[in-house]
Image: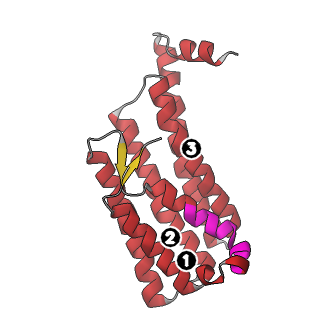
Amino acid sequence: MNARLLLHRVRARTKQDRLVARAIPQLLTFANAALGLFAILYAIEGEVTKGAVCLIGAVFCDGIDGRIARALRVTSELGGELDSLADGISFCLAPVVLIYSQFIISPRLGMASLVAYLCAGLYRLARFNVQCNSTYFHGVPTTLAAFILSLIVLCQHQLATYLPWLVTPKGICCLVCGLALLMVSKIRIVKI
């Protein structure tokens, strides 16, 4: 079926079509949250590679749910709030559990860096919800930070060869703290 025809059909004014149109982006948002949960559970079980893949899937779902909602003209305040809650699970909490499970960071510095990342991510999401500018982000998006940490987990053996300092506990702590600072920074990043 032609994409334009599908969009036209879903944009139709019948009540059933509108319900279907509203459900599509919300299902993607829930898939984002579910993939974040799966990432946490895999990390707890020691399957960090599967957890990292789940986070990358969550990044994909998060990237298209809003676009689809706008294309279908079914954006809502509820959808935005659900998206932020799903992002908190997938891009704030899940990366912390994944990094902790993979690198078992030292108790003092490591735990402090993970708490900083979690709090910075949650702050970043809250700031996004109240910010008025729609042309750029303030600070690095949580999705990008989580994507970077997922790639670190997936590519750690290659990184151990070429950047061995990065996959040490201190290197990971520095990276996590750096991402936390970038999330709460005032750096302007243009929305794509």
Q: Residue at x 49, y 61 (%)?
A: 145
Q: CA distance from mark 2 to mark 1?
A: 6 Å
Towards the viewer: 40 or 192? 192
**Residue 107 sits above or below residue 138 on the image:** below
Q: Is the magenta region chiefly helix, strand or loop?
A: helix
User: Residue 129: image x %, image y %?
Assistant: 31, 47
Q: Residues within 10 Å of mark 3 (few under 14, many from 20)?
A: many
Q: Name the residue nearer the viewer: 91 or 47.
A: 91
Q: Residue at x 52, y 50 (%)?
A: 33
Residue at x-position 43% and y-position 75%: 177
Mark earlier in primary sequence (3, 2): 3
The quadrant of the picture occupied by the N terminus is top right
Q: Which mark is residue 61?
A: 3
Q: Is residue 34 magenta?
A: no
- From this viewpoint, is residue 124 visible? yes
Measure how far apart labels 1 and 3 are at the Cα level: 24 Å
Range covered by the magenta-colored residues: 148-160
Please give the name of the residue rendered at 48% of the width and 79% of the height, measured from the top-left corner.
174
SS of the residue under disc 1: helix
Residue beneath disc 2: 96
Task: Measure the alpha-carbon separation of dots 3 and 2.
Answer: 20 Å
- Residue 24: % across, % down: 54, 30
Instruction: Pinpoint residue 155: horizontal percent, then vertical percent.
Output: 69, 68
The answer to whether one can see residue 90 in this image is no
The residue that label 1 is drawn on is: 100
Q: Are marks 2 and 1 in contact (CB under 8 Å)?
A: yes
In this orientation, which residue lies closer to the viewer: 102 or 137? 137
Residue type at mark 3: give it: Cys
